[in-house]
Amino acid sequence: MLITVVIPTYNEAENLPRLAEVLFGLPLNLRVLVVDDNSPDGTGEIAERLKREYEGRLDVLHRRSKGGLGPAYIAGFRQALNSPETDAICQMDADFSHDPKVLPVMAVALEDGADLVVGSRYVPGGELDERWPLWRKGLSAFGNLYARSILRIPLRDVTGGYRLWRAEALKALPLGQVRSSGYIFQVEMAYLAYRLGLKMVEIPIYFADRRFGKSKMSFPIQVEAALGVWRLKWRYRHFPQKGSQARR
């Protein structure tokens, strides 16, 4: 199984070389696609150097400016899906909050019949960084429960971004209709997967805080995500409902 790992980047110069080294050390057949939003810290140039270093295994998609997480992923998905060799597509943050060493476990779940495997913080065995204060953990858990409850998605973690998609399943999603640009993008994709009846499996992960670089999360982003849940419910009110069950 060939997995293409799509990694959006903006100012990830410190993390990207470390992440590439760990990913290519995994016992998996991997390609990496870096989607860089013209990072001012030189991430795009570093990605080009890595492309030469890992010739044939790493590619770079340069976007002209910072245009949001959702559009970056959609652009990466489209390029990855254009390759007939790609069997699965992984979405992963560049900051090591998503442990690459969990990916082989997720790959096994996909090979066992899942359409979407979610690295979950909220199933038994999942955990948030112990350095997070209680208020931050509470806010994260509430935001996740809020989205789950309104959209009735049978996943424990609908806001997390560590996911492995079967390529054929991802092709079935109406990517051209996806409008979310911020972190609500993760909720929109999970909601579409649920509405289309994809088989979803959750694998527990430890969600670590970033060690290098600056977090992109902010209060305005959190407000946008809260309002965005209601927009999703309205936008897809006539979308075919096949339903899905999540397995943990």
Image (tube, helix red, strand yellow):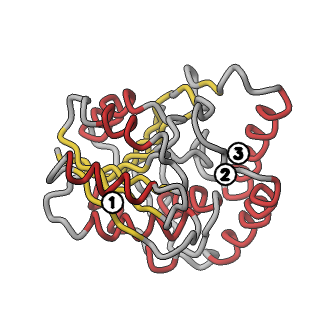
- In the rendered view, tell whether residue 90 sits above or below residue 196: above
Q: Tag on residue 216? A: 2
Instruction: Label 2: state its secondary structure.
Output: loop
Disc 2 to disc 3, C-alpha distance: 18 Å
- Mark 2 residue crowding within 10 angstroms, few (<14) / some (14–19) / many (20+): few
Question: Upstream in the sequence, badge 2 or badge 1?
Answer: 1
- In the rendered view, tell whether residue 42 sits above or below residue 92: below
Q: Which residue is at a point 65% across and 27% down the rendered structure image?
A: 128
Q: Quadrant of the N terminus?
A: top left
- Disc 3: which residue: 144
Disc 2 to disc 1, C-alpha distance: 29 Å
Question: Upstream in the sequence, badge 2 or badge 3?
Answer: 3
Is residue 246 visible in the rendered structure shown here? Answer: no
What amino acid is at disc 1?
A: Ala
Instruction: Label 3: state its secondary structure.
Output: helix
Instruction: Label 1: state its secondary structure.
Output: helix
- Disc 1: which residue: 169
- Mark 3 residue crowding within 10 angstroms, few (<14) / some (14–19) / many (20+): many
What amino acid is at disc 3?
A: Asn
What amino acid is at disc 2?
A: Lys
Image coords of residue 106 (percent x, y):
35, 35
Mark 2 or 1, which is nearer the eye? 2
Disc 1 to disc 3, C-alpha distance: 24 Å
Q: Is residue 147 left or right of residue 168?
A: right
Image coords of residue 197 (percent x, y):
44, 58
Q: Is residue 78 left or right of residue 237?
A: left
Q: Which residue is at a point 70% across and 75% down the rendered structure image?
A: 234
Q: Which residue is at a point 35% across and 34% down the rendered structure image?
A: 103
